[in-house]
């Protein structure tokens, strides 16, 4: 009988009510599309950091590590995995308005916040019917991708089928659970790892079990030692010190170090760090100030903080800068020993962002320039190599191989002449702050005229100061110890690399950078560049960098004989560039002579003879910092062998060296080579690593479009570099030493793409090779062995299908 009011309930009734309440609560927790909840096993077989992260590092981060990671899925950290994927591409050359930034760890802090920005989970999704969700595999896009790759493996050592689109411009599908079946039907070879050798049985089963049990992640453990903790505190105290002078210097340093991976060289095993602006003071959890650019107005009190980097290091964005006792003393010497005062502290408005020369005018110009020269390679790596991940906005304005040198700070005009500095500073502003499409024309024209006015003033000033012409001592010699004085830059289509020293054949062009050029290039391509910017912003950046390159070339031509300057310049600007030269650039100084001695070349020497002679004089000027001569690329006949390497390695270089004296006309194989090709040469337990760099020659690099029409492939060359060069290997070969001469002979016979395919079939490391991932890892180990501070995972998004 039912109980009457006021009568105590039976135990059975109480239990029934309790079970009913638990059932209602459980139903309220059913996963939904807006708020998917993971199905998590109480017992976890695998640990994310110990078991899962190594698999991602071995076979996933090579594609999912940078801004151009497919579907913005970054697997370098647990946070990136939890953030998930997005259908919105970061790189979009036709974007009419700026995109809302999606920087991991900056623009949102939790998965829920990323969902609000359009990201969807790849670990835990909605299947619509909770009864069918037996375990985490049913709700995981990641598992579906891995299973698809497992179901449709590519034949070992085969070329990828032509209907599999591997190009960088391929449309991103980015399927979610609801449309995954359609994706799989339309892209049977679209599983992961994409277009490459798959996971091993053990790797797949490990990931499958981990996902089935709920794909539990945890952040990387971080526990600094006492010495590291004290170093962090000391540097945070330094950057946050009071006083107008110190605040201005800290702001200047932050804008130059925000992209660096900071290292403590005095402390063994120390982490890398990033310098960030945080709403919280030292000692509290870092809360990043999420401005688009590092020189945007924070609109509130902030603190400079050192944030440990616990994500996996990828080579492309790994640009290091040392902090230590030596650096602390150097900063004190450069910025605080000179006498100077701050007047009105600069703000963060349009003019302050556009013209750093005005913003930081109170800091002695010599201090600023010397600060950049101290680590010139770091700054050049920042604007040449990264960290934007896909750099064709900037790289198509430079040639494929050239040398860069710098004006000596004791003679550089902007640094040493206050009147001249005051007169030209207003002309040194940079475009790109206004991203509106309608502003493109007016912004570009205004800044172009200012730049040309500046260059004319500069040439007049230098001609008046030295009427007898440029002298070799105007070029910085690294003060007898700094190897950053001589740099070689290689372009690899939409990426680029920098190496200390003068490498490769004598180039067609050489850049001479003074302080205004070095600082403007850094601000234009790093500080003020917005990877999420509109087509207007990207175009303004590209067009102004064209002027920067042109200015560096003007600076160099001062050292050439006056009557040779125009012919050399015309050779650099062939074809339609002659028209652009007439309407965009300023005229050369063809009157002021040069003091350099070219007499040994006779009457009317050709361009190559002049460039070769200048390279000899340059090497003499900076002999103490030039490093060992490049006997691989600029040596012939006897006496080219290096005494510092083994007999076997001398054999390797003797076989490779003849390639560097060829052109695309004499060795058609050069025209077929990818941009960057890694070579691993083995002999028993020995291995040597080299890079073949394809240098494409152009009639000119003055235009954004139709680059293919300006290529002159018969003039292409190849540079052989010891070690790895570039963040994005386009292909690699694995060659036993006993086969190396046969390999080179076969390469010499290649005259078509099919011929290169045949070469790859015998010695190539194709994406489908069972050794693909292990050999790629060995290239990284080589860097760890030879230059461990610079090691990171290589990106294979550009690896070709040979």
Image (cartoon, rainbow, N blue to C red):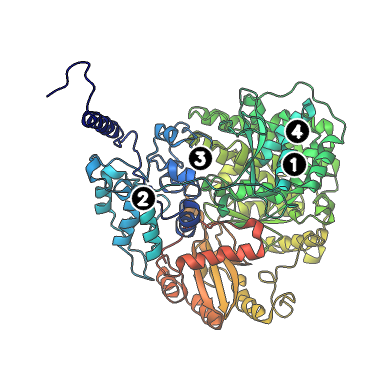
Count of residue discs? 4
Query: Observer-nearest residue: 410 or 497?
Result: 497
Q: Kindly identify which residue carries mark 3.
A: 104
Give the alpha-carbon distance from disc 2 to disc 4, as whole Å: 51 Å
For marks 1 and 4, the one nearer the N-term is 4
Task: Please state, as top left, top right, bottom left or bottom right, where the C terminus lies in the image.
Answer: bottom left
Give the alpha-carbon distance from disc 3 to disc 4, as whole Å: 28 Å
The dot on residue 249 is 4
The dot on residue 515 is 1
- Depth check, mark 3 against mark 4: the one in front is 3
Residue at 43% across, 52% down: 168
The x and y percentages for residue 307 are 63, 40
- Depth check, mark 1 against mark 2: the one in front is 2
Label pair 2/4, CB-CB below 8 angstroms: no
For marks 3 and 4, the one nearer the N-term is 3
For marks 1 and 2, the one nearer the N-term is 2
Q: Is residue 72 left or right of residue 275?
A: left
């Amino acid at each position: 009988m039912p109980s009457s009011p006021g009568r105590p309930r039976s135990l059975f009734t109480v239990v029934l009510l309790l079970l009913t309440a638990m059932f209602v609560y459980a139903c309220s927790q059913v996963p939904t599309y807006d708020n998917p909840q993971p199905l998590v096993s109480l017992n976890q077989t695998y640990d994310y950091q110990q078991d899962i992260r190594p698999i991602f590092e071995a076979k996933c981060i090579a594609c999912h590590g940078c801004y151009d990671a497919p579907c913005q899925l970054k697997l370098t950290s647990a946070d990136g995995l939890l953030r998930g994927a997005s259908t919105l591409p970061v790189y979009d050359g036709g974007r009419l308005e700026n995109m809302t930034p999606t920087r991991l760890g900056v623009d949102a802090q939790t998965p829920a916040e990323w969902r609000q920005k359009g990201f969807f989970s790849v670990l835990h999704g909605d299947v619509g019917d909770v009864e069918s969700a037996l375990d985490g595999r049913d709700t995981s896009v990641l598992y579906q991708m891995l299973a698809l790759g497992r179901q449709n493996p590519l034949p070992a050592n085969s070329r990828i089928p032509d209907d599999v689109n591997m190009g960088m411009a391929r449309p991103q599908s980015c399927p979610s659970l609801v449309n995954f079946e359609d994706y799989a039907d339309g892209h049977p070879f679209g599983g992961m790892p994409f277009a490459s050798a798959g996971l091993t049985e053990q790797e797949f089963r490990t990931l499958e079990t981990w996902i089935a049990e709920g794909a539990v992640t945890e952040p990387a453990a971080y526990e600094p030692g006492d010495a590291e903790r004290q170093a962090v505190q000391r540097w945070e105290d330094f950057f946050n010190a009071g006083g107008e002078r110190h605040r201005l210097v800290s702001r200047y340093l932050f804008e130059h170090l925000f992209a660096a991976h900071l290292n403590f060289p005095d402390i063994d095993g120390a982490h890398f760090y990033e310098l960030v602006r945080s709403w919280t003071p030292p000692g509290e959890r870092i809360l990043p100030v999420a401005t688009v650019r590092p020189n945007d107005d924070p609109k509130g009190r902030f603190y400079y903080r050192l944030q440990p980097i616990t994500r996996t290091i990828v080579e492309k964005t790994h640009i290091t800068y040392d902090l230590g006792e030596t650096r602390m003393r150097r900063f004190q010497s450069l910025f605080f020993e000179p006498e100077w005062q701050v007047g009105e502290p600069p703000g963060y408005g349009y003019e302050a962002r556009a013209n750093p020369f005005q913003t930081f005018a109170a800091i002695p110009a010599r201090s600023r320039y010397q600060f950049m020269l101290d680590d010139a390679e770091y700054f050049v790596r920042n604007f040449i190599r990264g960290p934007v991940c896909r750099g064709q906005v900037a790289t198509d304005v430079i040639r494929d191989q050239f040398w860069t040198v710098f004006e000596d700070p004791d003679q550089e005009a902007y640094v040493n002449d206050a009147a001249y500095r005051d007169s030209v500073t207003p002309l040194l502003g940079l475009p790109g702050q206004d991203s509106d499409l309608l502003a493109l024309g007016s912004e570009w024209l205004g800044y172009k005229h200012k730049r040309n006015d500046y260059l004319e003033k500069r040439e007049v000033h230098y001609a008046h100061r030295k009427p007898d012409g440029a002298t070799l001592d105007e070029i910085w010699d690294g003060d007898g110890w700094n190897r950053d004085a001589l740099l070689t830059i290689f372009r690899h289509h939409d990426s680029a690399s920098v190496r200390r020293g003068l490498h490769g054949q004598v180039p067609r062009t050489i850049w001479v950078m003074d302080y205004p050029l070095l600082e403007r290039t850094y601000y234009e391509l790093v500080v003020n560049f917005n990877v999420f910017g509109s087509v207007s912003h990207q175009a303004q950046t590209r067009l102004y960098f064209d002027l920067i390159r042109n200015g560096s070339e003007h600076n160099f031509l001062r050292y050439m004989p006056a009557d040779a300057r125009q012919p050399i310049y015309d050779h650099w600007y062939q074809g339609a560039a002659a028209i652009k030269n007439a309407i965009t650039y300023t005229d050369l100084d063809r009157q002021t002579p040069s003091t350099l001695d070219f007499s040994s070349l006779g009457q009317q020497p050709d361009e190559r003879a002049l460039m070769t002679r200048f390279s000899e004089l340059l090497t003499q000027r900076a002999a103490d910092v030039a490093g060992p001569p490049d006997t691989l690329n600029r040596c012939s006949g006897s006496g080219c062998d290096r005494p510092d390497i083994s007999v076997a390695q001398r054999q390797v270089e003797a076989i490779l060296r003849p390639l560097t004296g060829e052109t695309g006309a004499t060795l058609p194989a050069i025209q077929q080579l990818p941009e960057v090709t890694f070579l691993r040469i083995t002999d028993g337990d020995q291995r040597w690593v080299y890079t073949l760099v394809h240098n494409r020659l152009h009639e000119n690099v003055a235009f954004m479009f139709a680059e293919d029409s300006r290529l002159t492939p018969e003039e292409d060359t190849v540079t052989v570099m010891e070690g790895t060069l570039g963040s994005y290997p386009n292909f690699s070969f694995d060659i036993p030493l006993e086969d190396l001469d046969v390999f080179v002979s076969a390469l010499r016979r290649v005259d078509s793409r099919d011929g290169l395919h045949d070469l790859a079939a015998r010695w190539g490391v194709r994406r489908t090779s069972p050794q693909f991932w292990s050999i790629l890892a060995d290239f990284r180990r080589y860097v760890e062995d030879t230059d461990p501070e610079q090691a990171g995972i290589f990106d294979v998004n550009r690896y070709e299908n040979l």
